[in-house]
Image (cartoon, rainbow, N blue to C red):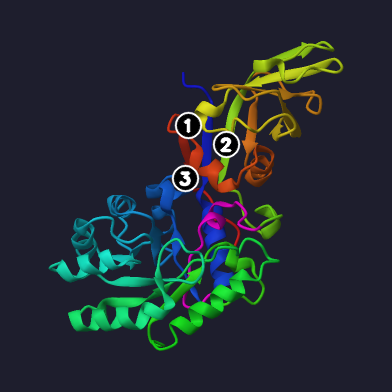
Amino acid sequence: MPRKTVARIDTGALRHNYRLACRLASPARAMAVIKADGYGHGIREVARALADVAPKFAVASIEEALAIREAGVDHPVVLLQGPHSFEDVATSAREGFEMVVHSDYQLDWLEQAPATPKFWLKVNTGMNRLGFASAALAQVMARLKDHGAGEQVIGFVTHYACADDISSGFTDKQTRVFAEAVVDWPALEKSAGNSAAHFLPGQPLFDWSRPGIMLYGASPTLGKTGPELGLEAVMTLEAELTAVRTLQPGESVGYGCSWAAEQETRMGIVGIGYGDGYPRHAGTDTPAWVAGSRIRLIGRVSMDMLAVDLTNSPAARPGDTVELWGRHVSVDEVAQHAGTIGYELLTGITARVPRLYDSSGDGPV
């Protein structure tokens, strides 16, 4: 019989979060970002769950786009990093993928390809990862027109560096740079808003927003958890309480004896560890939940198990289900204790943890 370590995926909550993104983005439309295997939730299942509400998807690579097609979903798919090889151009033209072109070598591929897919141009507005300088856009557009590919340009995209920090003025600066850079092409579409931008008061989201992490219930905003932003937890990570014992004062648990009981303590062992993707750096006091009560981790996380203090849950017994994150414990809380972000935790759950999908509800509207 398999162990009870599972990730339960609530597709109703996923749809709720997407609808919230749409309301916040309006009048812009929202393309659902489902890269990184649907942020660890399963790209095929996420695409199917959103297919009747999301008009367009966005991913990082051609492999992810093809996985959406394998799931039977024929929506437009935006390749946020564009083609990684010349062959990707032909594949995109055949499958109806929309490429984001950010470099001259990708323009070379477009000119050499027998068929040109629809594509976006990326504008570097200050993040300085990918994109054409705003001053170079006129030259790029002229080159595309000369080659005959200008009619395939959908529009322009950029990406915000500091939208998660509501106190930063850098997003306003990038927004102004972007708007000024594309002003000569008013008929073309524009896309700039990541998840965090949806929660910035008065922030323009142009024609298309690109919600990602918010779809999965984790917070994109510094100092806020997903529930505080009105988001529903999509993944609930669960494992079994496999043993319970009482530690006497001075007794320790786990590797390195990093935690020792100061008083008689009822302790439990949970069947999950960093081999499952639970963060090793989530140490003592990281919250969990069992038998109706919040509890805390103690000591070091091992590869296959971790220890919890059951003082606040006297009714907990071996065989009970422990929630490591989900509806009772936000993944953002766990991430804070582990010194990371919810993105890393959700995408880090390993393949040995089964994903179990619940499509019984459609989520609150």
Q: Which residue is mark 2?
A: 237
Q: Name the residue: 59% across, 67% down.
A: 198
Outermost residue, left side: 114
Magenta run includes residue 282:
no
Q: Secondary structure at mark 2?
A: strand
> Which residues lie in the magenta part?
205-221
Quarter of image, res 266: top right
Q: Is 314 located above or below residue 140 in the figure? A: above
- Farthest residue to the right: give it: 263
Is 180 placed above or below 69 here?
A: below
**Real-space Cα separation, disc 1 to disc 2, in angstroms:** 9 Å
**Which residue is labeled 1 in the image?**
353
Mark 3 is surrounded, within 10 Å at the Cα level, by few (under 14), some (14 to 19) or many (20 or more) other residues, namely many
**206 displayed left or right of 141:** right
Give the SS element for disc 1.
loop
Whether residue 51 appears in this view of the structure is no
Asked whether the beta carbons under mark 1 and mark 2 sit within 8 Å of each other, the answer is: yes
Q: In the rendered image, which residue does mark 3 sit on?
A: 41
- Coordinates of residue 289 in the picture (x, y in percent): 70, 34
Label 3 residue SS: loop
Viewer-side residue, 30 vs 151: 151
Amino acid carrying label 2: it is: Leu
Label whose residue precedes the other's in the sequence (1 or 3): 3
Which of disc 3 and disc 2 is earlier in sequence? 3
Amino acid type shown at disc 1: Val
The kind of residue on which mark 3 rests is His
Regarding residue 174, the answer to whether it shows in the image is yes
